[in-house]
Image: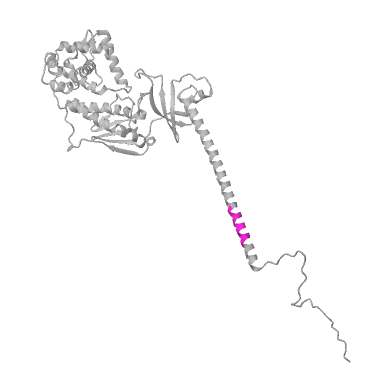
Amino acid sequence: MRGKATFDWQIREDDPQAEPAQPAFAAPRPTRGRWTTLLGLAGVFLAALGVVGQQVVRRAEANLARVEGELAAAAEAEAWLARREALYQTLAPLPPPWREAAGQAVTAPAVEVQQIELVEELALVDLRVNVPEAPWYSGPYRQVRVYREGPEGWAPARPVEALWGERAAHTTAFFRIEFGARDQATVRAMARSLDLTYLQLRRDLGLPPPSPYEQMTIRLVVGPGFDQSLDIGELRFGGSTLLTPPPELLPRPASMALAPALHQAVSLPLAVKTFAEARGRYTVPCEWRSLANGLGLFLRWEGKELPSRRRWEQERKLSSWLDDLGPPRLEHIIAVGHDCWNLPAYMEIEAPVYGRPVPRPELAATLIEYAVHAHGRQVLPALLRGFARYEGWEELAPAVFGVEPAELEAGWQAYLAAR
């Protein structure tokens, strides 16, 4: 009998063919490639985070440096203002100009500070002096002065070359100009006109132009490194060297720029030097000695506007004589015997007219000024050549000026009355 078959089914949990039960919301298991992607994204995020962090740090450091710099600059500016305030109080007892902007009443100061430049313990102060302290200043003038800061405050100091920078040289047709870097632009601006002035002086004195085959270079030293009174009337030259202070140190009219001020300061000793060369080429008899010296004075002071004590003293001496004795005569210029003696510099002996000494060279300078105004500059070399040829005004006046002595004298007196 065929028996009944029975099946006893069993399912093993570790059967590889069996399908595990799936949960309702199970996340898919990541594969190896997905893990790589996730790790890469995390690296990019961390790298970006690091860059941003570095930028934040750098910005913070830059802001800190800027704040520190601003604080240091503010402290330096405050210290500078305090030093400048103290310097202002030294220069003038009146309040500094900047207080006027705050609405405070300020009287026009005798001295106005245009600019201050601090160089360590020294200060270069550009001043406008509205009330000159000496009579030879005809009006307000500008000048740079040097001050030094010490334990007791600011005090006037001697200029030093270091304030003008490294020395340099500029060569023209006739000059080698040595100067500090501060004056480079000023020197170059006036160099060409100085050459022209030198040529004109030589023409006025009947001297030939310098030969290109001769060593005629004149050395001009512009600098504070020598004893100076800052009066252009004090001549400074020796041999072929001219000396002058930097233009900033020269008292000059308030409207005058530095280049023409330097030109005028140099042209004065240049005129004296060139006139001395001409005097060595001409014979000047004793009677014409004062007239020759007057020609030299005319060339020295022609066109000069820089204040000068020496020139003021000469003009005061001349004005006093003219005010007391009236119009001059040509005979007053004729030199007398002692005018040709070589007297010591401290002696001054002049033959009197109406009991008073005659300022012959100063009078002669005004005659030369009139002659150039009325007859032209050609009378200057003609006069130098005529000294040895003609005796007395009867011969000299027609030959040199083209007029009779009476006409020359009348024109001169009228010119002085108008002047």
Q: Position of residue 240 (x, y in %)?
A: 23, 33
Q: Looking at the figure, which quarter contains the C terminus?
A: top left
Residue 330 in view of the camera: no
Q: In which quarter of the image is residue 271?
A: top left
- The overriding secondary structure of the stretch rendered in magenta is helix
Q: In the rendered view, does 36 fall on the left or right side of 150?
A: right
> In this view of the protein, which residue sits in the foreground, 25 or 132?
25
Colour style of the rendered protein structure:
one colour
Q: How many labels does the image show?
A: 0
**Residue furthest out toward the front:** 1
- Point 49% across, 28% down: residue: 86
187 relative position to 90: left or right: left
Quadrant the N terminus occupies: bottom right
**Horizontal and vertical percent position of residue 351:** 20, 12
Q: Nearer the viewer, residue 185 or 350?
A: 185
Report if residue 50 lies within the magenta region: yes
Toward the viewer: 169 or 41? 41
Image coordinates for residue 396, horizontal then vertical, percent = 13, 16
Q: Quadrant of residue 64?
A: top right
- The residue sitting at 59% across, 57% down in the picture is 47
In the image, residue 20 lies in the stretch drawn in magenta: no
Q: Is residue 364 above or below residue 65?
A: above
- Point out residue 305 in the picture as x, y percentages from the top left corner: 31, 22
The residue depicted at 31 percent of the width and 18 percent of the height is 312
Which residue in the rendered view is the most extreme toward the bottom? 1
Q: Quadrant of residue 294?
A: top left
Q: Residue furthest right?
A: 1
Q: In this view, does 181 lie above or below 27?
A: above
Residue span colored magenta: 40-51
Residue 370 relative to residue 60: left or right: left
